[in-house]
Amino acid sequence: MKKILIISDGETAKHFVNRVMDTYTSENIYYVIETKAKEYKNVNASRFKFYEFDPTSLYKLANILKMEFAQAIVVMDNQADVEHTIKNIRTIKKHLRIIVLNKWDLKNKDSNVVLINSNEILSSRLIDYLPNVPVIAQNVGLGEGEIMEVLVPFGSSFIYKHIGVIEQKDWRIVAIYRNRKLIMPNRRRMIQPNDLLLLVGEPAVLKSVHKAIKRELGQFPEPFGSNLYIYLDMNLLHLDKVKNFIERAVFAHKKFGHTLVIRVVNPNDIDVLWKIKEYRSENVIIDINYDSQDLKKLFFDDIKTYHAGLVIVPNEMFDDYEMRTILYEAHVPVLKIADKEFFSIKDASIILGDNRDLEKISSTIFDISEQMSINIELYNYINEHQETKEQVIEHYYNLSTIFSKNIKVIKENANPIKKLKQKDDFVQIIPFTKKLTLRKIYSILSTDSERLYHKLDDHHQIFIPVQI
């Protein structure tokens, strides 16, 4: 059994001793020194020994310190008393670990003296009550933000998502608190408004997850980034198509807002460059790279430097196998611009597949449709297995109620790709998974509508990563 010395004076000290009495452990015995005795209820005499004297008296304190203590805790209201008490303890016990409530910004070079700043504790606790600020566990684990609790607001992008479809890379949902009750998470558990989620993971990752949970419609391209980024390799796009591509990309930028960065690589026509430079403005940055060395590194550096949340490329660039792989590795949504007018788009068209990736990106789809002022269409090929599709459709109906956004579910006996080929005024939205990086020749015999995205190459398409 470990002996713990508590030197107390004042109301804070009394509250602390009361809390110690309520602790679960029965393996410690506490010796409490008070300058003036206080009354405590339900004291366990076998665990608590009380003494009344002035601890600044070395003579009186020395008698107690003849015992071997595992730790000393000093909670007193007077700065001078605290300093003299620490000095007295050190006179007798050179290496005893001392925990001190620090109300006065005390400094101490002794590595075995731990100063707990009361002002920092109070301010940190008050910050926990601010809206949209993550609550971080400071006394558990490393205390660096690897344990966090987040309240799911009404209208959050996480509402009515099943935990099993949420990509949890380098983080996990470990508990749900609902109506003041603990609920253990599982893959089928659905997140509801006002749920309090307990998260564990890398601190930097949890910050992004917190932003994603708190995000409501109208924030895209958050949480992927804050700006739009046009990537134009003039070796991959014919010169007579550059002007139309830029015009359509700039029009898309006006729909989403934010800052637009136009990165040009492999410039090979002065007249075209001058046309591009005409778009330079307060919200449009033109960045031309004349060095063709290590363009992959340049791309990833730009994504980080400009905090890009949406990459806009022409169809010809996405068609390039190596470029498509690089775009996938960036884990940022990609808008692929085709040779069609962008302003005529009326619908976001989605083909339901036999997986639940569309549930993972559902909030982003609703956000895009809201900002572009377009409708959402779900195409259900009824000749395929329906159980997974019905779950996804239910999820979309739930979100449509939350966001007051109508959706249309279209049942098709034939492959929806054939019908969409005859339609002009839509943008197809597709989960951006690794299978899309495969060469197109390998999808010839596939029935997976996502792998067959290239069948609608002549239409605008948005590819959304399934990870946050």
Image (cartoon, rainbow, N blue to C red):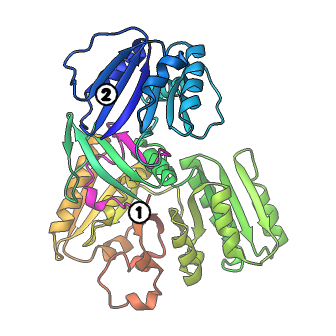
Q: Relative to 54, is 322 on the left or the right?
A: right
* Image quadrant occupied by the N terminus: top left
Q: Main secondary structure of the magenta part?
A: loop
281 w.r.t. 286: above or below: above
Q: Which residues are magenta?
A: 143-170
Where is 417 relative to 439, above or below? above
Residue 265 percent location from the top left of the image = 74, 72
Residue extending farthest to the right is: 270
Identity of the residue drawn at 41% across and 65% down: 428
Q: Position of residue 303 (x, y in %)?
A: 63, 61
Q: Who is closer to the viewer here, 97 or 88?
A: 88
**For mark 2, what is the residue?**
20
Between the residue at mark 1 and the residue at mark 2, the CA separation in whole angstroms equals: 39 Å
Mark 1 Cα-neighbour bin, 10 Å: few <14, some 14–19, many ≥20: few
- Residue linked to disc 1: 169
Q: Residues within 10 Å of mark 2 (few under 14, many from 20)?
A: few
